[in-house]
Image: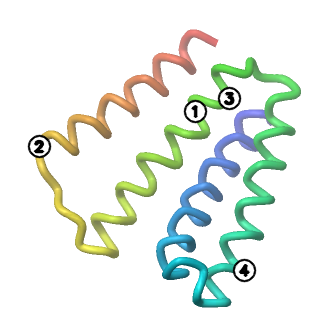
Amino acid sequence: MPWLLLLTAGLLEIVWASAMKYSQGFTRVTPTAIMLVAMIASFWLLAMAMRQLPLGTAYMVWTGIGAVGSFIVGVVFLAEPVTALRLAAAGMIVAGIVTMKLAS
């Protein structure tokens, strides 16, 4: 169950980071509201997952999901560039998450 909470928290991190981008510096109300709700829910679920998971593991997985997921959102929806180095960086983050999970 803590891994499901952590996965959901990570997905919500993608939501709030994306909503922050769409808020245009907090000048648009709806994306700003979505960001705040998703951020609170993401932090709460992370805290619940940390009741049973080690701090380092939980935080690394949470930030990794958010970082890679936000990278994907940027590429797919915002036409951000896809380069070999950016893909390699995302791949290393995923490798780190998998390694941390295996070590837990």
Using the image, determine if residue 92 lies above or below residue 6. Answer: above
Residue 58, numbered label: 3
Using the image, determine if residue 32 lies above or below residue 54. Answer: below
Q: Position of residue 89 (x, y in %)?
A: 27, 36
State the residue position of label 2.
84
Q: Residue at x 15, y 40 (%)?
A: 85
**Circle 1/circle 3 CB separation < 8 Å:** yes
Residue closer to the observer: 4 or 76: 76
Residue 33, numbered label: 4
Lateral position of residue 72 relative to residue 89, left or right = right
Using the image, determine if residue 95 lies above or below residue 64. Answer: above
Q: Nearer the viewer, mark 4 or mark 3?
A: 4
Secondary structure at numbered mark 3? helix
Which residue extends farthest left? 84
Q: Amino acid at mark 2?
A: Ala
Q: Residue at x 65, y 31 (%)?
A: 59
Q: Position of residue 6 (x, y in %)?
A: 70, 40
For disc 2, the neighbor class at 10 Å (few under 14, some 14 to 19, many from 20) is few
Q: Residue at x 38, y 25 (%)?
A: 95
Q: Which mark sits nearer the N-terminus, 4 or 3?
A: 4
For disc 3, the neighbor class at 10 Å (few under 14, some 14 to 19, many from 20) is many
Q: Which mark sits nearer the N-terminus, 4 or 2?
A: 4
